[in-house]
Amino acid sequence: MAAALKLRPKPNILTTSLAFLLLCGCAYARLISDPSDLISDGVSSTPFLRLYAADEACEQTYGFMPCTTSGIGSLFLILVYGYLMFLAATYLSAGSELLLELLGPGIVGGLFLPILGALPDALLILVSGLSGTPEVAQSQVSVGMGLLAGSTVMLLTLAWGTCIIVGKCDLENSMAIDSTDTKGFSLTGSGVCTDIWTSYAGIIMAISVIPFVVVQLPQVLNINSGRHLVVLIALIVSVGLLLSYCLYQVFQPWIQKRKLSYVKHKHVMAGILKHLDSGPLGKLCNADGTANKVVLKKIFTRIDDDNDGILSRVELKALIIGIHFNEITFDENEVVDRVLKDFDTSLDSKIDFNEFVAGVEKWLQEARNSIDDFHEETRREHALLGNQDDESGEAIENARWISIKAALLLLLGTLIAASFADPLVDAVNSFSAATSIPTFFISFIALPLATNSSEAVSAIIFASRKKLRSASLTFSELYGAVTMNNVLCLSVFLALVYVRGLEWNFSSEVLVILLVCIVMGVFASTRTTFPLWTSLVAFMLYPISLALVYVLDFVFGWS
């Protein structure tokens, strides 16, 4: 059980990173503040010194964290602090899933877990405008806006478009044929289909942009008075939408149940792969990561009791009975149905050797050819799905220990995020000062990679299964993450602006968020079939967003 509940990522990485930062905080260097002390060789050295060496003293966060005013040093700190924020997001995600497995949909699943998922982003936004004088906060708060816009845009453009590409199947009569991809990169002949529930998630995401519209009304109507009051109104609307979204999940928990169904199949897949890989017949993978067909033939022959070259339901059930799925009890018939759904391409309720090999290879690709790591990851990704008829029959083992582990993961993730959000914002500001790159663009591009990359990668991997259900769950997750960005993170940002009396000068940034959310929201809410060409639209929106902010701010002077 201890091995099954092993933390991921490995704790020694976190310990090493923290120790390194503490050692850096104890180190000091002589700063070259007067270039006249240097012997000139006739070549100007000011740009070099500004990029590679600090030319002024820096203020250490908390009085001991490492700091620098050089470009290279600030970039290094952004990478280190960004990785720590990535760990925080990972721990919060792991703890949230365990808690959801224990308690199921309801108050916890609908109210607390969505907030925990967006916590790293919310903390970064909070600290960007919380410290210092209002003047300092006004200059730093663009980091928070960059993260808010960057997270939304990245999930709806780069992640969304990649999911279309990796999940594409052949389209016939506007319907995707599961697991069939023979038309290559045909812009209209291949694509992805989702169910109607995913469209509803897209509609909810589109509604969540209302506070952005409200806060922009004074600029649109060219009204100079009452702007602070409009910020308060937008804040009230945003908080209202946040509570409505959470309560909707409490009383209509299909969003949670879809997420739980998403991880349940991964748990079945990981358990079977681990069982087959640890058997006496050999490893499933060759050294180069490909499937070992010799071993697969031996395994197939061993499962095929009557030696007819076909695996029947009875033979599959006999295999399943011998597998222990950690921390969860599955109904054997349900697991057999899941295996047949993934392996039986001929739809005859039997699996021949070619189907067996193809199915195992597909599972190995989803496991990223690392069965042990994938199995460790999915030990915590099983689900309790309430009263759903097709998702019942589960029981939690050792619930007390799992609850303790969930609490520790949530506490650890929260502490890391709270501790390193402020230093990360300081590092972004230092890098901006050293390179003259606006903080918005740095945070727009870099910070979402720290707080949202794990979520994006998981969605892409799951989309690669090339099935309607997997695609539906994938895009529902993306729309849900954007919805929380638009209501929770915006609420934090608006509260900062109102409480600290900051000026709202983010018209171009808000326009970008509205543009991307409206375009992708129209896609999501009006159609369930997404041809490959829609991924090109999504990809193009990312550079268009950056260019639009630059032109509006630095050419037309909107800010």
Image: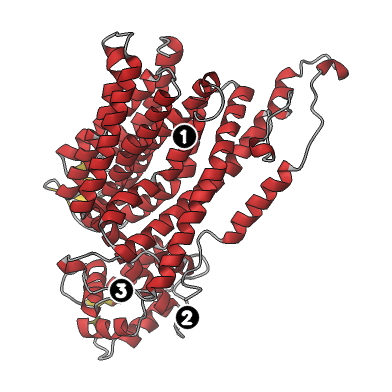
Could you tell which of marks 1 and 3 lies nearer the N-terminus? 1
Q: Decide which of 241, 174 is in the foreground and name it.
A: 241
Label 3: few (<14), some (14–19) or many (≥20) C-alpha neighbours in 10 Å = many
- The residue to which callout 3 is attached is 356
Residue drawn at point x = 45 percent, y = 43 percent: 120
| Circle 3: residue type | Phe
In the displayed structure, 158 sits above or below 297; it is above
Foreground of the two, 106 or 261: 106
What is the distance, in whole Å, between disc 1 and disc 2 at their CAs? Answer: 52 Å
Q: Quadrant of the C terminus?
A: top left
Q: Does any portion of residue 481 appear in the rendered image?
A: yes
Between residues 232 and 5, which one lies in front from this camera angle? 232
Q: Is residue 180 visible?
A: no
Instruction: Identify the residue under disc 1.
Output: 126
Category of crowding for the residue at label 2, using alpha-carbon neighbours closer than 10 angstroms: few (below 14), some (14–19), many (at least 20): some
Marks 2 and 3 sit apart, C-alpha to C-alpha, by: 16 Å
Residue 411 on image: x %, y %: 49, 55
Image location of residue 460, percent across then percent down: 36, 50
- Say if mark 1 contacts mark 2, CB within 8 Å: no
Tell me the element at label 1: helix
Residue plotted at (34% across, 30% down):
541
Q: Which residue is mark 2?
A: 282
User: Image point 26% across, 58% down: which residue?
Assistant: 105
Q: Amino acid at mark 1?
A: Leu
| Element carrying mark 3 | helix
Q: In the rendered view, would you say 458 is above or below 431?
A: below
x and y percentages locating residue 80 in the rendered image: 60, 44
Q: Residue at x 15, y 37 (%)?
A: 526
